[in-house]
Image (cartoon, rainbow, N blue to C red):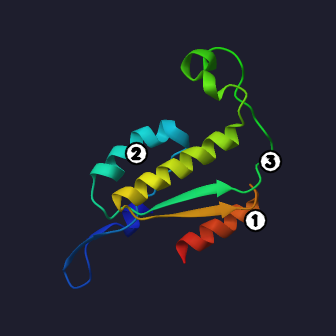
């Protein structure tokens, strides 16, 4: 998609540097790898954060290693709550830096919800 839609020039030959940067990142690990291009790169990257209103299951961070050593305050906390905090914090950083973004919340993780999101992003 990025290859097909990414263009340096418009139909009239004017420089536009437009297109999509189709990347997927999940949580803070991936944010660490894509964050530098977003926060230090050109201000043309528009980010869509996708969240789930009702996660299908409650997964807790275990009370064991390595959680105890790395982040003891996260032990026995819901992974969904942690992911929501990451999205809120990242969105606040985007707003502070004037980076364009939107948040889309799916009602659930289903073929219907994901299909709706994909259609919405391409309209």
* Residue 121 position within the rendered picture, expressed as x and y whole percent measured from the top left: 55, 70
Q: Quadrant of the C terminus?
A: bottom right
Question: Distance of mark 3 from mark 2, alpha carbons?
Answer: 27 Å
Residue at horizontal 47 percent and vertical 54 percent from the top: 92
Q: Is disc 1 placed on a helix, strand or loop?
A: helix
**Residue 42 occupies which quadrant of the picture?**
bottom left
**Residue 72 occupies which quadrant of the picture?**
top right
On residue 56, the disc is 3
Q: Which residue is mark 2?
A: 34
- Horizontal side of residue 37 vs 72, given as left or right: left
Rendered position, 28 above or below 71: below
On residue 26, the disc is none
Q: Is disc 3 placed on a helix, strand or loop?
A: loop
On residue 112, the disc is 1
Q: Is residue 21 visible?
A: no
* Residue 94 position within the rendered picture, expressed as x and y whole percent measured from the top left: 41, 56
Question: Distance of mark 1 from mark 3, alpha carbons?
Answer: 15 Å
Residue nearest the observer in this picture, 85 or 20: 85
Mark 1 and mark 2 lie on one chain; the one further toward the N terminus is: 2
């Amino acid at each position: 998609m990025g290859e097909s839609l990414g263009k340096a020039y418009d139909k009239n030959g004017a420089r536009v540097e437009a297109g999509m940067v189709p990347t997927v990142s999940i949580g803070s690990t991936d944010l660490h790898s894509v964050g530098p291009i977003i926060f230090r790169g050109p201000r043309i990257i528009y980010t869509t954060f996708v969240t789930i209103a009702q996660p299908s299951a409650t997964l807790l961070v275990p009370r064991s290693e390595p959680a105890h050593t790395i982040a003891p305050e996260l032990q026995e906390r819901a992974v969904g709550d942690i992911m929501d905090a990451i999205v809120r914090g990242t969105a606040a950083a985007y707003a502070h830096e004037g980076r364009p973004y939107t948040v889309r919340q799916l009602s659930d993780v289903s073929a219907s919800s994901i299909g709706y999101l994909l259609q919405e992003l391409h309209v």
